[in-house]
Image: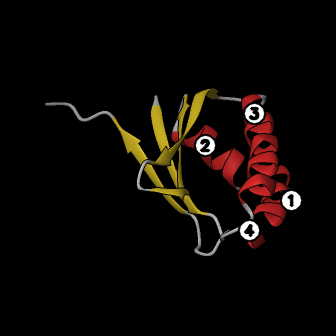
Amino acid sequence: MIRVLIERHIAETLEEAYEERSRKVLQQAVSAPGFISGETLADSHDPNHRFTLANWRSEADWDRWFHSDERRELMLELIPMMDEDEHITVLEQSVF
């Protein structure tokens, strides 16, 4: 299993529209092969700074979703609402 951390910053006044459209992205991701679970968190000091932490079966599953036409089309609605590019970090459990 891997975890994917997606960091986004929403432009002022677009929070409500962003929430509506970001839910669509998550709803579609839920049905993608390999998706396990996900949650979205807001920075307690900056409510426009959002993090999504998603669990995927494998990096190949995540890559398939990330590069899918479906996600690309959904992101076309979200990108104009962000005042920075999204930042994605793929995490795997460390073995010590």
Ranked by sequence position, the earlier of labels 3 and 1 is: 3
Q: Front-most of 3 and 23?
A: 23
Q: Amino acid at mark 2?
A: Trp
Q: Residue at x 77, y 72 (%)?
A: 80
Q: Which mark is residue 1?
A: none
Q: Secondary structure at mark 2?
A: helix
Q: CA distance from mark 2 to mark 3?
A: 9 Å
Above or below, 34 against 67 in this view is above
Disc 3 or disc 1, which is closer to the eye?
A: 1
Q: Which residue is mark 2?
A: 62
Q: Which residue is mark 3?
A: 32
**Label 4, residues with CA under 10 Å away: few <14, some 14-19, many ≥20:** many
Q: Is residue 13 above or below residue 1?
A: below
Amino acid type at image mark 4: Met
Q: Image height check: is 57 above or below 62?
A: above
Please name the residue shown 69% across and 46% down the image: 64
The residue labelled by disc 4 is: 81
Element carrying mark 4: helix
Residue picked out by circle 1: 73
- Mark 2 is surrounded, within 10 Å at the Cα level, by few (under 14), some (14 to 19) or many (20 or more) other residues, namely many
Q: Amino acid at mark 3?
A: Ala
